[in-house]
Amino acid sequence: MEVITIPVVVRADRRLVIDLPHSTPLGPAEVVIRPRSNGSGQVATPAGGRAAIRAELLAAGFLTEDLAVPAEAIPLSADEIADIGRIPLGARPSEDLINEDRGLY
């Protein structure tokens, strides 16, 4: 049996009118409503889907769960933080670097 998938939009009146392809066999059928969002505009996650996806990502090494700051980490001072955002003396201007990357266009 071939499954027929027809995207629809459920409007405020909660009514659907579905036009089926001519190749649809006649006789008993079943209609399944599977919302694509949870009502707030966010995409719905199938039951158990989130846990399955997390397990798959973790097994593949693409999910980090340990986001704690190492105990030996030393916080930066305000001056060190300011130095991070400062261009070193004698450095080429940013526009030169950008033009070099872009080339002539």
Image: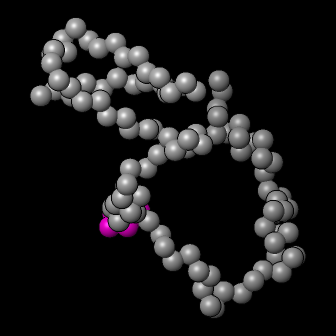
Relative to 71, residue 82 above or below: above
Where's the N terminus, which quadrant?
Answer: top left
* Residue 53 seen: no
The one nearer the camera, 77 or 14, is 14
At a point 75% along the width and 83% down the height, the residue shown is 75
At a point 36% along the width and 58% down the height, the residue shown is 48
The answer to whether residue 33 is left or right of residue 92 is left
* Residue 25 seen: yes
The one nearer the camera, 92 or 27, is 27
Q: Residue furthest top?
A: 22
The one nearer the camera, 91 or 7, is 7
The answer to whether residue 85 is left or right of residue 22 is right
What is the basis of the colouring in this image? one colour
The one nearer the camera, 78 or 84, is 78
At a point 38% along the width and 38% down the height, the residue shown is 34
Task: Give residue 59's position: percent from left, percent from top.
Answer: 32, 67
Task: Give residue 51's position: percent from left, percent from top.
Answer: 38, 63
The answer to which image quadrant residue 72 occupies is bottom right
The answer to which image quadrant residue 81 occupies is bottom right
Relative to 97, residue 56 above or below: below
Residues rendered magenta in the picture: 58-62
The answer to which image quadrant residue 68 occupies is bottom right
